[in-house]
Image (cartoon, rainbow, N blue to C red):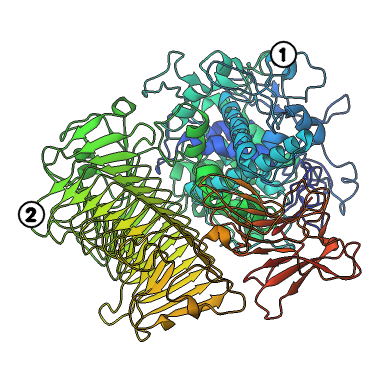
Amino acid sequence: MNFREIDGSNNNQNHPEYGQTGENLLRFTPAAYADGIQELANPNNPNPRNISNTLFDQQESIPDPRNLSDYVWAWGQFVDHDITLTHLQSGNNAESANIFIPQGDSVYTPGSFIPVTRSLFDQNTGTDINNPREHANELTAWLDASQVYGSDEDRANWLRSFDGGKLKVTAHSTGDLLPTRGNDPDAPAMAMEESIGESTFVAGDERANEHAVLTSLHTLFVREHNRLAEIIDATHTDLPSNTADRDEEIYQRARKIVGAEIQAITYKEFLPSLGVTLDPYNGYDTTVNPGINTEFSTAGFRLGHTLVSGTVPRLNEDGTTAPVGELDLFQGFFQPERITEDGGIEPVLRGLATQVQQQTDAKIVDDLRNLLFTGAPGGGPVANGTDLAALNIQRGRDHGLANYNEVRQALGLSRVNDFSDISSDPEVVAALEELYGDVDNIDQWVGMLSENTLPNSSIGELNEAILEDQFERLRDGDRFWYENDVDLAQWQLGENGTVSDWLENLNLSDLVKLNTDIDNISDNVFFVPDIVVTNTNDSGQGSLREAIANADSGDTIVFDPSIAGETINLTSGQLRIDKNLHIDGYENNPVNINAGGNSRVFQIDDGNNSVQSQVTIDGVIIEGGNVTGNGDDGGGIFNRENLTLSNSTVTGNTANEDGGGIFNAQTGNITISNTTISNNETKEGLASGGGIFNGGEINISYSEISHNFANDTGGGIYNWSPGNITITNSTISSNTANNDGGGIFVYGDTEIIDSTISDNVALSATADGGGVAVFGNAEITNSTISGNSAEDDGGGVYVKDNVFGNIPTAIITNSTIIENTAVSDGGGIFNFGVAEVENTTIIQNNAPDGRGSGIASFGNTSITSTTITSSTVADNENSDIDFVTQSQNSFISGGNNVIGTGNAVGNFNASTDQTGVENWEESSKDEEIIGTNQNDTLIGNEGNDQITGRQGNDLLIGVNPDSNTPGRGEVDDIWGNRGTDIFVLGDEDVVYYDDGQTNTTGAEDLTVIYDFEPNRDRIQLHGNADDYQLQLSENQQHTQIFSIANQNQPELIALVQNHTELVLNSDQFNFV
């Protein structure tokens, strides 16, 4: 695995200097210094303070028309401090570019000046017109969380606790805050530290104290780092044992994930909120220089200064104003006590989500235009403040920015020929013409902010082009970009799956909720919700029913914090949603929407099957729905649209017909995540799908379907043809069907991945498929099917024969089928159609009154085929593998099987099959070791072991690592099954499975890895990649791993089944 250098170097291995600290800013256009070398650009342009007074004077609040929240400008500043910093000159020779105050100024004294010091520049530039002045970026250009960790080793090390990979913090009653400098002379420099003193917060970027809002975001991500460090320490099984090495590894992994989180939030939430549209990501491009452009840092990304309001709300948990009141913007500059004494960061983070920011325009509030830094100890230079608009204009001239039209043309935009081409606002047009006289004189920052905004955007054409260029290059030129980083695709993050899975669905609000006591915040904090439900009434003003009725398409409805955890009792019928709508509740304290058994809860149907509405329901309980008429489906939800259901509970709902909890019609598409669907039921004789009935498309992840009942089929889920369901990282348990499919009934195509199907029941005397009844097509991968029962056939899985002219197919791979019961045939599996079983363990199942406690296959070869490859079917009650009628030939061996007893054993005659194994322990393996559903470390002994991981992230070791010759003379078989597993073939001291002979191939001692997943699992080896070689097996289907260090002849130590694409110098291997 690879980690970033703290100074940003060596990211691009062809150009190690790309993006590192100290690199000069790039340019779209040649420098426009007045003398061509270094003098301020545009010397004949108007006085910056005069421009500010004429154009940027904001007399009233102008909220963003797209409801962008204060999180937009706050995040923009946080990101800016990750990627760009140019210091000012200092000392007696520092150059000034003071802004003189014009006559008639109403705030500052005419004839005085706002002192401006010119930027520090590269001393190797500014020598002649062929080498004009350039300015260095003091930070790494990458989006790498340098504002959290620093861009140099000294700062980075000072911020670390060197304990469990964590960062330093200051304990506080409201939660950990940033560390303070105290009286430590080695503390990294922070802006204004001389004025603030020992209470100065220290962070990765020296500007962290600039404002309480910025400090709050810095604090949030230090907490996030430490949260991740704890998860990594507890769950990553491949960490070094040495304390110092372990600390370093945890720190680096957490740092990588935090950087990836900042990238994901910036590109999936922040930029889209502004209306920036990027080209699709096509992977890492070594030819792209991600360096920061002067036009971006000095103008383009300074749009945020127009977005800020004069106050920042500070709110209690219930949404009321905190006792300390709202924060006037000018009072938050360089005053860390606004955090330490005013209730921590939570009041600020709540407030940012509730206030609409100012729109992007050529207007700036007085707190920035006249009173900037007023609140800083010691005050500002003139009238106790300064003017950020004037400073931005002057800084552009200091950096030699070309004029507005030249920058437009450099970015492929057409030049403007008239002031009216820039803006449709006659006042803006008149002011520009009065100030500049000619469109070719306009300063870039001024012209950019004066432009009309683009459709569905909050910024103008030039601003969008600058941001698009910069953020595409930052993404495409980054070798460690989160979508390109294989570590993130393999590292697990607790219940969230891999880090890549976590990032795919990540919102900034998730990190706020995880690291503060804030729950009542909308999913997308970059927008202020349109409508707030203020009471629990069934109808009328402030009710959910009225909110839905009055909402425009695309609106978001949220609940006032005062009704979090309360119940809305529906007394006048179901709630109908017929438009694009987002209902955003509280994940940890959801509002209960309860129909009281009187009606359905939600009908989601716009009446137009040709166009699908987009509906999201998040963080609610849907309960008490009941539909009783003939043909009435979907007690909790009836859906015909595109529905996203997350962080919710659907419980206690009833349907006379299908879909006790949810009915998804053929036109419907539902995405379900982090949701529980339980205790729902269908009542009538042919009513199916106690939890869910699907006729359309459903994707279920990280959810639980449990304790539902269907009077007919599909106790948990019924998937009707042509419906499609994909289930990942979920649990289907304790559901009951009177007839087939206690857990799931499959007619349409169904994929089950990394999931558990357990303790479901098919109840009646003729009911088949306690766990899964397959009447269509099902693929089950990396899953566990356990403890299910059927009163007839197929306790775990039942595969039907001819259905509507089609032969059902079940493909089961890398799974465990254990402790299931069928009263008749097929305790683990009964196959009447087509079944393909590979790398699967089928043990301890039972069919007390029939055949095939492990697998029973119908014997008619014209209908049925059961192919078993690299699997174990043994240690089941009675017989393990039987045909039910006619012939054993419906069984097909793919080889490498361990098979017990039964009338079909004769068909398992491949040279690599073992048969007649009455108990699994009595196979050629000396010990059977089976993991749990948790993260396990499974260690073999000094014999031939069979090791089977289950659902966790397992460390799998076939040998006794304490032996003097670990693995010598052993042949171990290892299955990882679900999770991110590590197969250990060596440790820091020795290679495992070495026969001790330098002139033999070592074929008598090795491990066989049956289910390695190259994009998820890893193989651990001693030494380095040069000590090994990979060769394909004789049949070209498997990969052999040979040790070649100190060997006259390569020594075989492992066989990786069914993979031919392994690469030693990749993240498929760990070397220790």
Compared with 803, 1056 (above or below) is above
Location of residue 183 with respect to 1058 vertically, above or below: above
Return the mark for residue 629: 2
The mark closer to the camera, 2 or 1, is 2
Q: Secondary structure at mark 1?
A: helix
Residue 156 or residue 956, whichever sits in front: 956
Q: Amino acid at mark 1?
A: Glu
Give the x, y percent position of residue 237: 65, 44
Which residue is rendered at x = 45% and y = 28% of the image?
Answer: 518
Which residue carries the number 1 mark?
198
Residue 184 lies, in percent from the top left, at: 79, 16
Q: Earlier in the sequence, mark 2 or mark 1?
A: 1
Q: Is residue 367 left or right of residue 966?
A: left
Q: Is residue 445 visible?
A: no
Which amino acid type is shown beneath numbered disc 2?
Answer: Gly
598 left or right of 295 in image: left
Is residue 189 shown above or below 1069? above
- Near mark 1 (Cα within 10 A), the count class, few <14, some 14-19 or many ≥20, is few
Image spot of residue 530 (x, y percent): 33, 39
Element assignment for label 2: loop
